[in-house]
Image (tube, rainbow, N blue to C red):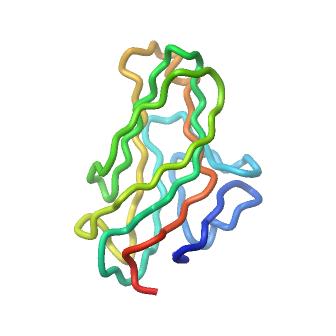
Amino acid sequence: MPRARPVTFGTAGNYERRVTLTGFDTGDAHSVWTSQQVASARMHLGELDGDVQIELTYSVHLPNADFALEITALVNGVPIETWTERGWSGWRRAQRTLTAPLAACQGIATWLAFRLSSPSADASQAQAASFALHAMEVRTGAKD
């Protein structure tokens, strides 16, 4: 996995040799997206000597402004951060930096998963919510 250089997603992206995706639709030119409850990205991080910072550029689609989508990021099954997106309708782009603790990471294969939930939504609204990855950058905590 390259350090301090973004891995980009979508058919125009450079992710295919670096990240293996599960649960994401890969047909879009500039992102991979999902409306499934769980989707993940498997990365080979190499030799690690500390916590790993992962900067995400992503978008979220909400069906209406009252809808709340809770997103939990997990590293190898360990929850590392949960946040809630709400307050708009349609797509909105954002950035977030996640800290993956060294103890949860494996140099050979580290799975970064995203669990989507919307406890107050009915089934049709929950399917209308989506999470898309545009880019991911491993910034610190790994030997070059």
Q: Is residue 133 above or below residue 41?
A: above
Q: Position of residue 86 (x, y in %)?
A: 49, 25
Residue at the image point whose x is 67% and y is 49% from the top: 31
Quarter of image, res 84: top left
**Count of marks, rendered view:** 0
Q: Position of residue 127 (x, y in %)?
A: 54, 24
Q: Position of residue 118 (x, y in %)?
A: 41, 24
Q: Position of residue 110 (x, y in %)?
A: 38, 66
Q: Is residue 41 above or below residue 33?
A: below
Quarter of image, res 101: bottom left
Q: Is residue 141 above or below residue 97?
A: below
Residue at the image point whose x is 44% and y is 15% from the top: 121
Front in this rendered view, residue 22 or 50: 50
Q: Is 101 displayed left or right of 32 in the figure?
A: left
User: Most extreme residue toward the left, as rendered?
Assistant: 103
Quarter of image, res 120: top left
Q: Is 92 displayed left or right of 86 in the figure?
A: right
Residue at the image point whose x is 43% and y is 45% from the top: 114
Front in this rendered view, residue 66 or 74: 66
Q: Is 10 displayed left or right of 137 in the figure?
A: right
Residue at the image point whose x is 30% and y is 81% from the top: 49
Q: Is residue 57 above or below residue 126?
A: below
Front in this rendered view, residue 59 or 75: 59
User: Most extreme residue toward the bottom, as rendered?
Assistant: 144
